[in-house]
Amino acid sequence: MMDTEAFREFKTGLTLLRDRRAAKALPHMRRAVELDKNNPYYMSSSTARRMWGRALELDKNNPYYMSYLGVVLARSEGKWGEAQKLCDSAVRMKRNQAQLYLNLAEVYAAAGRREDAREALESGLKFARRDVRLTIAINKLTQRRPPVLSFLSRRHPLNRQLGRLRHRTMRLFGQAS
């Protein structure tokens, strides 16, 4: 049973992190760890690695354990090869689960292999078609054109309008991707 106070603290900490207030988020995250020490979302990466490794030992055929252990290995220890093997094996075991493709893409992206990450997500679309998370992740990995006026921010209204005009023009001439 999840400790609701720990979850509330964790959620507050995440909100503060998203708002770029890390200093205020830290006490909430620490409190969540104190209240629920066995929750993998609150743990340090080394503790999470041990936990996922133990879970995999107990159930060697669980693709989720394999996949998440791969993500933890990639993030915490930079063991890209081992992480990729684990995530690949998980995907082969259960091809219709979008989360496994997302984890594999995360490992590739963390290793600096953005093109491989995009290919993994595209192959995930073939098997888990209705999961919008795959499309969102592909869009995040897609290379964007530079702003038309580089001295203005991408969100500046003039850059946005000129960017739309550039896109329409390139599409008209068959060069848009």
Image (cartoon, grey):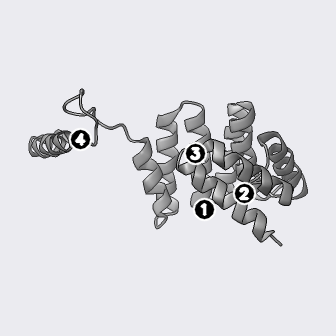
Quadrant in the rendering for residue 135 = bottom left
Question: In the rendered structure, which disc, 2 or 4, sits on the residue that comes first in sequence?
Answer: 2
Say whether residue 36 is visible.
no
Q: Nearer the viewer, mark 2 or mark 3?
A: 3
Could you say where residue 28 lies in the image, as x and y percent from the top left?
A: 72, 53
Res 41 label: none
The kind of residue tagged 1 is: Gln
Say whether residue 13 is visible.
yes
Q: Secondary structure at mark 3?
A: loop
Is 173 positioned to the left or the right of 58 in the image? left
Q: Nearer the viewer, mark 4 or mark 3?
A: 3
Do the numbered discs 1 and 4 sit on residues whose CB atoms are within 8 Å? Answer: no
Local crowd size for mark 3, using a 10 Å CA cut-off: few (<14), some (14–19), many (≥20): few
Is 156 positioned to the left or the right of 107 in the image? left
Could you say where residue 93 lies in the image, as x and y percent from the top left?
A: 69, 57
- The residue that mark 2 highlights is 64
Could you say where residue 16 lies in the image, as x and y percent from the top left?
A: 59, 52
Could you say where residue 53 lies in the image, as x and y percent from the top left?
A: 85, 47
Q: Nearer the viewer, mark 2 or mark 4?
A: 4
Q: Which quadrant of the rendered structure holds the C terminus? A: top left
Residue drawn 16% across and 41% down?
158
Question: In the rendered structure, which disc, 1 or 2, sits on the residue that comes first in sequence?
Answer: 2
Res 97 label: 1
